[in-house]
Each structure stands twice: as structure tokens, then as C-alpha cells.
Image: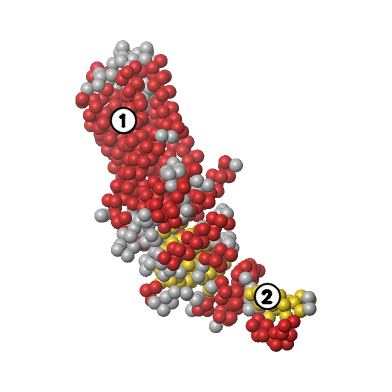
Amino acid sequence: MTGVRELSEPTRNPEAPDGTAIEVHDLRMRYGSVDVLNGVEFTAYRGEVLALLGPNGAGKTTTIEILEGFRMRSAGDVSVLGVDPAHGKESWRARLGIVLQSWRDHGKWRVAELLGHLGRYYAAYSTPERRRPHDVDELISRVGLEEHASKKVSMLSGGQRRRLDVAIGIVGRPEVLFLDEPTAGFDPHARREFHDLVHRLSDLEDTTILLTTHDLDEAEKLADRILILAGGRILANGSADALAKQVSGQAEVRWSRHGELFVHSTEDATGFVRELFAQYGEEIADLEVRRASLEDTYMTLVHEFESGRSEAAAQTFEGVTR
Amino acid sequence: MNPQWLAVRAGGARGGVEFRQSLTNAQDLWNQLFFPIVAVVVMFFLRGSTVPGTNFSIGSMAIPSMLGMTVAFNGLLGVATMLTVEREDGTLLRAKAIPNGMLGYLVSKVVTVSGQTVFGLVIILIPGLLLFHGLAVTAGSLVILVGVSVLGLIATLPIGAIIGSMLSSPRNLGLAMLPIMGLVAISGIFYPITAMPDWLQAVAQVFPIYWLALGMRSALLPENMVAVEIGESWRHLEMIGVLGVWAVIGYFVAPIVLRRMARRESGSSVAARREKAMQRIT
């Protein structure tokens, strides 16, 4: 087993064997002679939010499409809700939600009409624990489209359409939800509302969420766990904090004394600050400790990978975690 | 309730909604009305000319033929257009992402196209009966008209679905349009087929358009007009035979082609097409 896996710090039900929603083992994908996925490994636990990060062409979309059952893999074991997506029946599909990036489909439909229609297909898969589909009015207010419920889809703004995409994705009250770059084109306000929606989904509905994004800030805010995919492999797997600590153990300490500014990089920020106070006490002002941000972590990892040291990067990482 | 049955009913409702949308939308309505109106107007000016060897108006003869052509157009091009457009814009992918969504989607297409076919028939039939003389409408002719329409849709819908699955984008629809227009020209829609060279007659008789037009003529023209048809017969059995063969071929091939097409659909394939389409626009 790789050390990357051990880094994972599932926040919920880590021990429960049936708490697994998505399991990916040695996933490989090859187009012609190009290996897009090169042994991807990860596990998502029920109710967990996972963000898949990576540079363009790293295989994020391919991975998510394999899990959705829209793409056949070349090799490896994949299971979503205990089922191999390559052989998923309609009853399996009813438990998934997929947020697609819409363009101009269903332009003539009205928002409430479309959600009501798409929900009908899920009614046969309703269970006492999980009533399907969602009530349309409740769903519309949940994504903040109340004022637009009777509007034609083609009249919605870009952000409103994306919220409708999310509503369509969750109309069947999914147990696992896939979002491929959900907030591309959102303004900051819409983004904040979307984040609240995702938090509510994972907290209240116990929905497992796998999303891809380019936005590191978003990944940090939304995800319980972050997977960094590059060159067809998971380079890192852990919470934003854990990743930052593992990749760059250094923290930056800034302070001022007698109006003069100081900066110091250290691995043991707490210890350093303790000594600082022991030595100078009251003289210390403007104290600030900055850990490496997720962005620093990501840049370090991807840079190492892209400068042709992917193996080395992965190795170092394993070394650190063990 | 059985999930498949539920999806069939949802698809039926969807077809109803889409048919209603196509009637309450200027663009769609114009697309549907343009060709029948032009054809009826042209035929109206040709009503004075007669079919050679008879004193029957060419315009009147063309009305039932155009009904047959309408059925074929809707079955072949209507479905093909929807499939290519909705594959490009992601409607199909949405159907694929929901349980039994593809089943519901296909049912909805059958309902929408059937509705549009009926609409197209009425658009031609009403002025046809009011402005053209010599059409013989009886209870029997209505039964034949309905029967030919239903059989025609059964024969052409799957072929339309196959065409739509194989075209890579709506901008390639012309590839399908051209040969179909060619078939219209040789299928005796606007002029008796017996005026065509024998080999062209043979070609036309392989395809559904000729037989649909013939069936409609048998429904609405007076009995003596059979004299200008091939073999001086309405050939109902042959019509059922040829359309039946097309239907059987369609029902074997269409599911295979549709499934193969649907399997390839994914978020990235829709995104790639969107990119390609946007490049063309800008």
C-alpha cells in the first residue's frame, strides 16, 4: 500500500466498514498509447466532501466520469455505493446525483416544470429513509431560485442556470453527488451561497460529495479532504491543514520589536514563539504566524511533478507520512 | 410502481410539454408551417394543369402525396434533428444521468413527433379540402389515412433515430436532407411517378416516401385515378410489406445504434461539442 493512503484523515466513520461510499483501487485509463490515469487510489466515506484538485489534463474529469458510469476504465477496481459503475443498473443510478454543466438544453422549459418532470423518474426509488424526489418548491428555495420558478430556463443568468444545474443534480436526493467544476463562472456571492448549499447537503442529507475544482480556496472551504491529482496519480490526500503541514513543514513568524519588523521561518512555530516571549516578553508586538496555505502546498507539489520529478515527489511524500 | 412504466409515463408527459412548446414558439411554428404553406400555395397555382391522360388537377393529386411526404419528413428528419440538437446541447446527457431517463426520452420523442405529424397533416389537409376539388373523403378514406400515418411513423421513426445517432452535429443534417429531398423528387409526390424512367421508379419503390404518398393517394383520390399508378393498383399489400420491412430493419438496428451513441455521451463530450459549436458562432 502506498503511504498516500495513510495520510487520509476521514472526518466521519473512519472505522465503519459499511461507511464507504466510493472506493477506487489502482484505477487506470489509457487512450491509445497515453496513460491518463496511472493507478489512482482513494476512498470516500459516507457524508464526506472530497475535492479533486489538479492541473488541466491531470485526469480529474476522466476519474469522475468513470465513477459516474459514463466512461469505461482500462483497469482497476472501482465501486460506488457498493456497485461497479460499469455495470450500474438504473436502481443504482437513482441513488446518484450528477451536476452537469448546462449550456442551452431545456431552454423552453420553466424552472419548476423541469424540476418536477425530472423528479418523476426518482419516485419509484423512494424509500422510507429517503423520500424521493425532492419537493420542487423546497428544492427551488434551497438553491435560491424562488423568484425564477416560473421563468423559462433560457431567461436565467449564467449563475442562476448553474444553481438550476445543482438543483437538477440533487432532485433525486442522491447518496453520492458528483460535481465537475461546479462554481466556474459564479460571482463571489453565488459562490458563497453554493458553498452553504454543499455544507447543508453533506450535513443534513448525509450526501457524499466528490467535486473537482480549480479554486484552491473553494477546495479548502468545502472539502473534508483534498486529493491532488497530477500525471494520473493521487499525489496527496488529506485535509488542507494536513497537506500544508506535510508538504511544507515551515511556518512563517512575523513580529515587531521597538517598531522594527522581523520575519523568521521555522518548523516549530509554537516553540519559537514561546522562546521569543521568554526572551523579550512585553517588547513583542504585531505577532503573526502563517502556515503554508493550500496554495503553497499545491504549487509545490504540482511544480515538483511538472519539473519531471513526479516519482520523487510521491516518494518524498510517502516518506514524510510514514 | 414499476420504474420503467413510470419513466414511460413521464416520457409521455414530456412529449406533451415539448409538443405544446413547439406550438407556442414563433420560431418552431414558422419551421413547421413554412414548407406546407409554400407547397400548398404552389399547388394552388398548379390546380389548373391536369394529370396527363386524365382531366384531374395536378394540384389536387399532390395534396395527398404531400400528406405522405409529411409523415416521412417528421419520422425521418424530425427525429434526426432533435437527436443531433439535443445531443449537442446536453439534453440527452441529462436523460442519461437520471434513472430510466433514456427510456423516457425516447418515449417523449415518439410523442412529440407524432403530435407534430398530426399537426403537419392537418395544416395541409384543411386547405387541401377547402381549396382543391376532386378529393374524395369518406369514412373509409379516414381509416386509411390514419392507418398509413401510423404505419409510416412506425417505419420511419427508427430510421430517423439511426440517422440522428450517426450525424455528429446538427450542422451535418444537410447530409441527410439532401438524399431525402432527392427521394421526394423521384417518388411521384408532385408528378405521377409513371412519368419517370423505369430505373428511377425502381429506386423510389425501395424507400418509404413513395409508398406513404401512394397510400395517402389511395385514401383521398377517386378510384379512377388508380390508372396513373404503377400497375394501375393502389398496392396496399405491397405498401404494408415495404413499410413493414423498413420497420423491422429499424427496430433491430436502431437500439444498437442508439445505445452505442448514448454510451459515448459524457460531460466532457458535451463540453467538447459546445466548444466546437462556439468556435463556429464567433
Q: Residue at x 49, y 43 (%)?
A: A155
Quarter of the figure with the N terminus of chain B: bottom left
Percent coordinates x, y for residue A146 in the rendering: 45, 50
Whether residue A164 is visible = yes
Percent coordinates x, y for residue B212 in the rendering: 31, 30
Are dots 1 and 2 on a single chain? no
Q: Please, is residue A270 above or below residue A174 in the view? A: below
Q: Amino acid at mark 1?
A: Leu
Whether residue B58 is visible = no
Q: Nearer the viewer, residue B235 or A287?
A: A287
Mark linked to residue A288: 2
To which quarter of the image does residue A248 belong?
A: bottom right
Q: Which residue is mark 1?
A: B212
Q: Is residue A153 left or right of residue A253?
A: left
Percent coordinates x, y for residue B172 in the rendering: 48, 40
Quarter of the figure with the C terminus of chain B: top right
Going by the picture, which residue comes out furthest to the front? A282
Q: Nearer the viewer, residue B190 or B204?
A: B190
To which quarter of the image does residue A285 belong?
A: bottom right
Q: Are marks 1 and 2 in contact (CB under 8 Å)?
A: no
To which quarter of the image does residue A68 belong?
A: bottom left
Q: Is residue B119 left or right of residue A229?
A: left
Chain letter for the residue marked with disc 2 in the picture: A
Q: Nearer the viewer, residue B151 or A116?
A: A116
SS assignment at label 2 = strand
SS assignment at label 1 = helix
Q: Amino acid at mark 2?
A: Glu
Q: Nearer the viewer, residue A276 or A194?
A: A276
Q: Residue at x 29, y 42 (%)?
A: B248
